[in-house]
Image: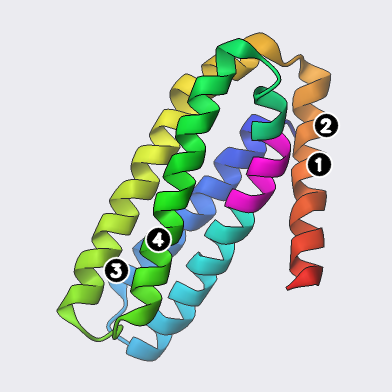
């Protein structure tokens, strides 16, 4: 598996969790699912930054897109913090959750489009495969540290 497939798999996991949150009426289940979304997004952002984005920053043609993507990661973290402070039963929570979902969807579309296209021009197949291994290792290390 290369980094592109790995990232798409991660993106799909979060998209599925978003849909489950929207579909549930149980506040207990919603809370559990939100904690899972939070964990997945934070692990993804941190491990992606230290592996995939770090590799892309070594190339002029991918540096700008990577910097933009990192700003989007910061925005997602802000939404997560805001949501964590709100009552999950409130209307404001669902409104903020919708904004988080939109922000993540926008980021994923840009990443799987522009960033992947540019990355494929600067990374060879072996590097792309190694980055998937590296990202998984980074995630495991972060899970142990948590």
Q: Are marks 2 and 1 in contact (CB under 8 Å)?
A: yes
From the image, give the main secondary structure of the stretch colored magenta.
helix
Give residue 119's quadrant in the image: top right
Identify the residue shown where x is 79% and y is 70%. 145
Which of these two is toward me, 128 or 100? 100
Circle 1 is placed at which residue position?
A: 134
- Disc with the residue nearer the chain's start (3 vs 1): 3
User: Disc 2 vs disc 3: which is toward the camera?
Assistant: 2
Q: Secondary structure under badge 1? A: helix
Give residue 57's quadrant in the image: top right
Distance from the alpha carbon under mark 2 to that under mark 1: 6 Å
- Disc with the residue nearer the chain's start (2 vs 3): 3
Toward the left, the furthest residue is 91
Distance from the alpha carbon under mark 4 to that under mark 1: 26 Å
Residue range (magenta): 45-52
Say few, some or many: other residues with alpha carbon within 10 Å of mark 4 (under 14 / 14 to 19 / 20 or more). few
**For residue 42, above or below residue 62:** below
Which of these two is toward me, 85 or 122? 85
């Amino acid at each position: 598996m290369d980094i592109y497939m790995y990232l798409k798999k991660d993106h799909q996991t979060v998209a599925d969790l978003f849909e489950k949150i929207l579909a549930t009426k149980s506040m207990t289940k919603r809370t559990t699912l939100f904690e899972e979304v939070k964990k997945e997004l934070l692990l993804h952002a941190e491990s992606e930054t230290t592996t995939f984005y770090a590799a892309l920053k070594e190339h002029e043609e991918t540096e700008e897109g990577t910097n933009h993507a990192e700003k989007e990661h910061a925005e997602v973290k802000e939404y997560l913090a805001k949501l964590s402070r709100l009552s999950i039963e409130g209307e404001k929570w669902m409104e903020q959750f919708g904004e988080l979902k939109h922000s993540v969807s926008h980021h994923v579309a840009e990443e799987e489009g522009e960033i992947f296209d540019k990355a494929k021009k600067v990374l060879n197949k072996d590097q792309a495969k190694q980055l998937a291994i590296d990202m998984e290792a980074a995630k495991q290390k972060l899970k142990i540290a948590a």
